[in-house]
Amino acid sequence: MNDKTNVLVIGAPRSGTTLLSGLLSANKSATTMLPECTYITQIIQHFHDFLHYSDLQRFATYAISEQALTKTYRGMVDSMLDTVKSHFIDTDYRYLILKDPELTQLVDLIPCFFGNDSKTVCVVRDPRAVIASMLNVENKKKKDLWLAFRKKPNWVTTNVLVNQIFRIKRLIPDFFPYYWIVQESQLNKRGAVHVVRYEKIVAREEGEFERLEEYLGFAVNRDGFGKVHFDFDRTDPTYSAGYGKEIRVTNSDFRKSLTNRQIKQIEILFSDINTIYRWW
């Protein structure tokens, strides 16, 4: 019998998923903070694509049925989760804290792969601040790719640099699904997704923490990151100086990174979502 409860932390990149995972991991009944479960998400994404985009002949040959396909991929996820748990065989814990922003767009598959008793917490943050933060990250990547291209110009470095430039141009519309898919998901409509406001967490609003604790069934740290067993990669462009430390309100202003045109584009695109959260 599996007595561990999987807690999935989702939300757009740069929205505070790392911070929330750190707060949850501070509880003595939870695992230490883990790196993003990227590989598990990739398995689930492959399952989704296999199920929805296969032609009938290949699907019948290699999958036979949705039930058989689910069993195969669920086995791969379970095996990877067992590997994760093997790091904590001498630790008494009940909650396995897993997070990955990319899992946000596969939210309705969470019960299938993590169990019907799993808990899903989605962090939402003002999309203007989120996209501004991500734009800074992507520009850092572009700078590194530009230096690599200048050092060794060839079709590989050219292709990677051009793709990065186009990624930056698509950044605003690419972020919309992280909000919309969760909002329209069946899991959310059943009341099985608990939404946390990033702005309220960093402001330490007690009501926000109390509602989260009621949903999860365990106490949540108010101060900052809990146990960090696997250190952060400080060379990663997404690394933040606040990782592993206490909660602090960011002093960054999205207006310094975004043009007025970009801000207007975001506000128009996210206007329906904004009627719920009232960021502006």
Image (cartoon, grey):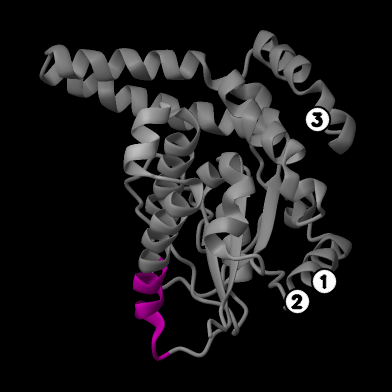
Q: What residue did someone put label 2 on? A: 217
Question: In front here: 276 or 56?
Answer: 56
Circle 2 — which element?
Answer: loop
Circle 1 — which element?
Answer: helix
- In the rendered structure, does residue 88 fall within the stretch colored magenta? yes
Q: Is residue 255 left or right of residue 225?
A: right
Pointers 2 and 1 in contact (C-beta within 8 Å): yes
Q: Is residue 40 left or right of residue 106?
A: left
Residue 244 seen from this side? yes
**Residue sitting at x 52%, y 16%:** 170
* Amino acid type, residue under disc 3 in the picture: Ile
Pointers 3 and 2 in contact (C-beta within 8 Å): no
Residue 253 seen from this side? no
Give percent across and percent down for residue 271: 82, 21
Mark 3 and mark 2 lie on one chain; the one further toward the N terminus is 2
Give percent across and percent down for residue 130: 63, 34
* Amino acid type, residue under disc 1 in the picture: Glu
Identify the image quadrant of residue 262: top right
Q: What residue did someone put label 1 on? A: 214
State how far apart marks 3 and 2 are (Cα).
Answer: 28 Å
How many C-alpha atoms fall within 10 Å of the one at disc 1: few (<14), some, or many (≥20)?
few
**Quarter of the rendering occupied by the C terminus:** top right
**Residue sitting at x 64%, y 47%:** 108
Mark 1 and mark 3 lie on one chain; the one further toward the N terminus is 1
State how far apart marks 2 and 1 are (Cα).
Answer: 5 Å
Give the residues in magenta.
Answer: 81-90
Main secondary structure of the magenta stretch? helix
Q: What residue did someone put label 3 on? A: 273
* Amino acid type, residue under disc 2 in the picture: Gly
Circle 3 — which element?
Answer: helix
